[in-house]
Every structure is written in C-alpha cells, then in structure tokens.
Image (tube, rainbow, N blue to C red):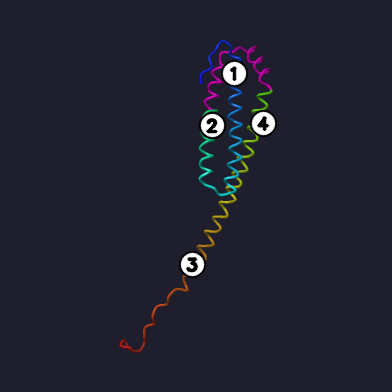
Amino acid sequence: MNLKNNDPKASILKLLRIEKDCYDQILDLQKEQLLAIEQEDEKRLDAVIENKDRLLKTAGNNEVQLKEALAPLSRESLAEVGKQAGQLKMEIESVLAQIIDMENNCQVELKARKFIVQDKILDLKQNRSLLKGYGKSNRVKPKISKSV
C-alpha cells in the first residue's frame, strides 16, 4: 500500500489507523488462541498462529511505510503530527499492552501443559520399568540331569 499524496500528515494518520486495526485484529486472534490452548485444539491453534503471523507482517510493512513517511518531515511538522495522532498513539499502546499480556498468559498456559505432559511421560516410563519384572518367566533348567 503506497500512500504518497500531497499531504504527508494525512497519510501518516491513515497509516497509524491501519496499524491500529491490525493490532485490534491480532488482539482478537490472541483471545481465540488462548481458547484453542485451553481446549487443546491444535488445528485451530495452528490456524490462529498463521493468521497472527500474516497480520504481524502487514503491521511490519506498515511501520516501514510510516518511517518512510516521517523521514522527510521537519521538527515542526513532526510535532504537529504528534499532537494530531496523540489519541491514536495511546490507543495503539493500549492494544499492544493487551496483546503482550495475552501472549504472556498463553505462554504460561503452554508451559503448564508442557509440564503436565512431561509428568505423564515420566509416570509411563516408571510404570513400564516396574512391569518388566512381571513378564513371562524363563524355564528353569534342571540342575541334575540334562535329559529331564
């Protein structure tokens, strides 16, 4: 998306709105990701992660365009754009903080499930090694004569 027009300030504000929309969609996907983790739905989790990756790439491209749009502006213009985009900037920061918090929650949940699975595997290994002694016993050979 190339937003080169006569007013760079308007294009910067438009890029910021697009970025906020991307982060809002990521936040919605983050909630869905947490549900997929809790329900242990791997297919849904994979789909959510792929969608988040696509949106993060879009947001990254948007940031590159934003930097390019900000580069030629003077300090006075930057200050004016900063005043105009103040509320939008605060909204973006709020959404990013929520995304980070949700991502940390997902990470904690995944680690907890990982430890549960590791414990189950260790229990199975211990049970298997305990059961080895209860297998079919070998025939005891006679000690007196080989013909018996």
Please determine whether, in this image, residue 140 is positioned above or below residue 10. below
Residue placed at 60% from the left, 28% from the top? 21
Instruction: Point out the tag, 3 or 1, that comes first from the N-terminus.
Output: 1
Which of pointers 3 and 2 indicates the residue nearer the eye? 2
Instruction: Point out the tag, 3 or 4, that comes first from the N-terminus.
Output: 4
Give the residue number, with chain letter if any, for mark 2: 55
Q: Is-magenta flag for residue 73?
A: yes
Alpha carbon of mark 3 to alpha carbon of mark 1: how far? 66 Å
On the image, the x and y values in percent for residue 38 come to: 60, 48
Give the residue number, with chain letter if any, for mark 4: 94
Instruction: Point out the tag, 3 or 2, that comes first from the N-terminus.
Output: 2
Alpha carbon of mark 3 to alpha carbon of mark 2: how far? 48 Å
The image quadrant that residue 71 belongs to is top right
Give the residue number, with chain letter if any, for mark 3: 129
* Disc 3 + disc 2, Cβ < 8 Å: no
Q: Is-magenta flag for residue 144?
A: no
Is 134 positioned to the left or the right of 8 in the image?
left
Please determine whether, in this image, residue 112 is positioned above or below residue 95. below
